[in-house]
Image: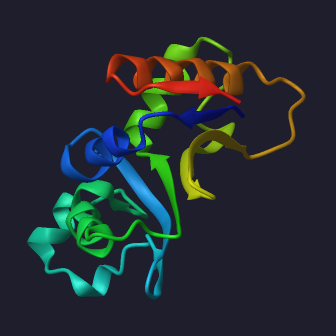
Amino acid sequence: MKAFLLTEQKQFMNQLLRSELFDHFLISEATIQGAISYTIDGHINRAFYDSDELETIAGFEYLPFAQFRPVCFELIKGKHTPLYMKFIFLLSPENAKNVITSSQTGFTCEDISAIFMNVTFKDERLILTTGVSYRTFTPDHSFDEAWDKLTARFLSKNGILFDIL
């Protein structure tokens, strides 16, 4: 796990809420505290959708951020900065498979249950942390290190400035 201090907060929040940059992630959970607090569970309520809509989210347990982003923007926009925010993103099953395979660490999709990217705004600091959830204990952290490096490349490639904490 690595923590990245995002140094250009306004730029990052614009990319998060106004661009498609994070749309390929799934939203596991979100918390936004402002005038009131919102806690969002990203699990998909399948009964809400008709059969055509279900096809677009087939294979997902959590909602793609692309579908939550407009709602999130509405909750955050305004003249006041939220007091606290936390977004827990997951790689989709397809992206997780690609990342695991390309890492060349020897881990398989059966070894890893989730790959995370968490974004937290607290005490005027915006921090992105990485995380990996394994199905069983392993002393081998080579995949964690690969995910940390991939995240740093993702941030750099997209012009997101950071310091490593």
Of the pair 147 and 53, the residue shown nearer to us: 147
Q: Quadrant of residue 71?
A: bottom left
- Percent x, y of residue 60: 37, 58
Residue 73, placed above or below residue 16: below
Q: Quadrant of residue 155?
A: top left
Residue 24 visible? The answer is no
Find the residue positioned furthest to the top.
104
Residue at 35% over, 17% down: 157
- Percent x, y of residue 19: 19, 44
Find the residue positioned furthest to the left.
52
Q: Is residue 14 left or right of residue 133?
A: left
* Quadrant into which the N terminus falls: top right
Residue 100 visible? The answer is yes
Q: Quadrant of residue 21?
A: top left
Looking at the image, how many numbered discs can be counted on the residues? Answer: 0
Residue at 29% over, 87% down: 47
Of the pair 108 and 35, the residue shown nearer to us: 35
Residue at 41% over, 45% down: 92
Residue 140, placed above or below residue 22: above
Q: Is residue 57 left or right of residue 39?
A: left
Find the residue positioned furthest to the front.
79
* Quadrant into which the C terminus falls: top right
- Percent x, y of residue 123: 63, 58
Q: Is residue 20 left or right of residue 89?
A: left
- Percent x, y of residue 23: 27, 47
Residue at 86% over, 33% down: 138
